[in-house]
Structures are given as structure tokens and as C-alpha cells.
Image: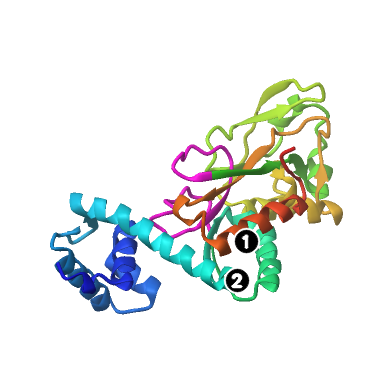
């Protein structure tokens, strides 16, 4: 093995291909031709002396030797980046790119504005913001930080609880004028419900009463949607009643375009969490963004920070 051929550039290429499982995807990510990626991998494997990746027509996977080499490579690259940050001091912390994944509606309405404020403070830091409600593989997609609503089960990520997202039952004044206002939860089955098709059990509405009691009410309707912004539009259009995050409809409530119904009853709040890829925790610019979001997230309507 000629150690001089084991460069950080080739090692980074190998790590990204191992994580994404696709040469073409990494070529697009790095802005180079696929032939460059292929060459980096071939030269690295020749230098190491063993095959690191197994290639098929549909996917690239790591060999046993590649899996061991990947773990060491990730550690080496993290140490190199940390060393650079420490050598550059504050300037190093304020440069580079951070990749963020966020729940779509929350990202559009609120998190994007927090990122604008963050970049106003740290002008040298670039942000790649990906909006999705799917539970993506953060490592494979090259994401550093993810903001997610709902319970999480991925124990491989570093989790930071950001708070609880309060929810309300809301409807448009035009809908209530046409169909009447529910007086008690038992009136809801006679109304049109706007339901989320990507949430299991949405045909039963869970509510918490004024005394803390919990009840489930049958909840149906002709309109189902898998995106919070579409549910928001359906509410404004008077298509029915829906449980909604406070931050999703705060401006509409203030403008009188929606009204809270059954104010003594509310859907249980939903946890809001931050996931951080463990290998990225020590990177200075990511620490800056984590601290910034933790500080500012409570300013989003209806987000109650942990005590």
C-alpha cells in the first residue's frame, strides 16, 4: 500500500458513496462527473489493497473490509474538521455548510425564518434546507441536523428535545355558519373532518378535556391530505374542521379567517425534537446552529419549551 495515495479527498468520496449507496448521487452532490468519483474510489482501493465497495447495477454496498475502513474514515475526517475549526478559531466556526432536514410545513412557515436570522449573524455559513415529512436516513442523505414532530425511535442519533407543539381544533367562520358550531365533542361525528392520510388512526380524534380526561371521538370526512400546508388551505376554504398545530394557523386565527372550536378540549401536544448525526456533534458551526435554534425555537407560536 502506498500511503501517499490515501488522500482526504478520496476518503471523503468513499465515505459519501458508502453512505448514499450511489456514485451518481455523490457526483451530483459534489458537483463533479461520475468518472471522477469512480477514479477516486479505484485509486483508494488500490492504495489500501482491498476492495472497499461492492458494485451492482442498482446499488453500491460496502464489503466487510469497507465497513471497517468506513468507521475509521469517519473518525479521521471528523478529527480533521475539528482540528481545522480549532486552528481557525471563531472564523472557522463561522464558515462551511450545514445540511438541515425539517418537517415541511414547520420549515416553510417558521424554521426558514430562523435560518435567515442565523445567516444574518453568521454570514459565512451556508444552509441546505430539505423539507420532508418522511423519516429519512440522515446519514445516507448527508444531513447534519433534522427537526422532527412526533415520537422518535432512532436511537443511533443524538436527540435534543426542543419542546411540545400545542394543537387546537379549528374551522373557518363560513363552515361554522353553514354547518353549525359543535357544542360538545360528541357533535364532531356529524361534521366534515380534514384528516392527515399519513398519520395512522386519523379516523379517531384524540382529545384532552378541561379536567385532563382523555377521550376518542370518531372523525371522518371527504378530504384527506398528507401535507400540513394543504390542510391549512382546506381549512381556510371552509372544507371542514381539523386539529392543527398552533404555529400552522396562528396568523389565520389572528386575522379572523379561522376560529377555535371546543376551546375546553384540545388534541394532545406533539413533541418537537432535534436529531443530530453523532459524527457531526463536535463540528463548531453545527454547535452554533444547534444553540441558536434551541434559543429561538420557543418564539414559534404554540411551541412550549422544556422546563
Query: Where is residue 95 drawn, in percent x and y?
Result: 56, 73
Q: Main secondary structure of the magenta part?
A: loop
Choose between 289 and 60: the one closer to the eye. Answer: 289
Query: Where is residue 109 drawn, in percent x and y?
Result: 69, 59
- The dot on residue 186 is none
- Image quadrant occupied by the N terminus: bottom left
Q: Which residue is mark 2?
A: 94
Is residue 165 located in the magenta-colored stretch of the structure?
no
Q: Earlier in the sequence, mark 1 or mark 2?
A: 2
Figure quadrant of residue 179: top right
Q: Which residue is mark 1?
A: 288
Q: Is residue 169 above or below residue 296?
A: above
Choose between 173 and 211: the one closer to the eye. Answer: 211
Q: Is residue 199 above or below residue 283?
A: above
Q: In the rendered view, does 56 fall on the left or right side of 107? A: left
- Indicate the secondary structure of the residue bearing disc 1: helix
Q: In the rendered view, does 281 fall on the left or right side of 60? A: right
Q: Are marks 1 and 2 in contact (CB under 8 Å)?
A: yes
Query: Where is residue 117 drawn, in percent x and y?
Result: 71, 67
Q: Which residues are magenta?
A: 131-158
Q: Is residue 237 visible in this depiction of the protein? A: no
What residue is shown at x 66% (from left), y 55% (from top)? 291
What residue is shown at x 54% (from left), y 48% (from top)? 275
Choose between 304 and 81: the one closer to the eye. Answer: 81
Q: Is residue 163 visible in this depiction of the protein? A: yes
Figure quadrant of residue 62: bottom left
Query: Where is residue 299 drawn, in percent x and y?
Result: 77, 53
Q: In the rendered view, does 45 fall on the left or right side of 158? A: left
What residue is shown at x 75% (from left), y 50% (from top)? 298
Amino acid at each position: 500500500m502506498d500511503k501517499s495515495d490515501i488522500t482526504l479527498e478520496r476518503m471523503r468520496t468513499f465515505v459519501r458513496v458508502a453512505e448514499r449507496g450511489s456514485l451518481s448521487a455523490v457526483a451530483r452532490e459534489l458537483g463533479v462527473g461520475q468518472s471522477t468519483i469512480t477514479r477516486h474510489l479505484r485509486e483508494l482501493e488500490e492504495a489500501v489493497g482491498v476492495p472497499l465497495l461492492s458494485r451492482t447495477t442498482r446499488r453500491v454496498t460496502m464489503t466487510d473490509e469497507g465497513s471497517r475502513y468506513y468507521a475509521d474514515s469517519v473518525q479521521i475526517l471528523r478529527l480533521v474538521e475539528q482540528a481545522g475549526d480549532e486552528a481557525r478559531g471563531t472564523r472557522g466556526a463561522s464558515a462551511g455548510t450545514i445540511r438541515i432536514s425539517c418537517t415541511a410545513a414547520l420549515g416553510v412557515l417558521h424554521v426558514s425564518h430562523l435560518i435567515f436570522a442565523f445567516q444574518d449573524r453568521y454570514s459565512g455559513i451556508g444552509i441546505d434546507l430539505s423539507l420532508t415529512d418522511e423519516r429519512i436516513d440522515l446519514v445516507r442523505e448527508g444531513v447534519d441536523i433534522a427537526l422532527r414532530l412526533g415520537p422518535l425511535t432512532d436511537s443511533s442519533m443524538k436527540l435534543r428535545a426542543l419542546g411540545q407543539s400545542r394543537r387546537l381544533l379549528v374551522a373557518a367562520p363560513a363552515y361554522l355558519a353553514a354547518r353549525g358550531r359543535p357544542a360538545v365533542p360528541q357533535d364532531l361525528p356529524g361534521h366534515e373532518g380534514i384528516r392527515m392520510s399519513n398519520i395512522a388512526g386519523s379516523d379517531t380524534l384524540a382529545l384532552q378535556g378541561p379536567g385532563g380526561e382523555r377521550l376518542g371521538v370518531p372523525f371522518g370526512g371527504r378530504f384527506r391530505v398528507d401535507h400540513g400546508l394543504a390542510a391549512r388551505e382546506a381549512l381556510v376554504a371552509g372544507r371542514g374542521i381539523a386539529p392543527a398545530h398552533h404555529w400552522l394557523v396562528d396568523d389565520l386565527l389572528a386575522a379572523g379567517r379561522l376560529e377555535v372550536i371546543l376551546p375546553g378540549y384540545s388534541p394532545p401536544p406533539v413533541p418537537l425534537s432535534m436529531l443530530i448525526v453523532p459524527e457531526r456533534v463536535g463540528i463548531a458551526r453545527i454547535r452554533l446552529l444547534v444553540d441558536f435554534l434551541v434559543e429561538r425555537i420557543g418564539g414559534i407560536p404554540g411551541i412550549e419549551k422544556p422546563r
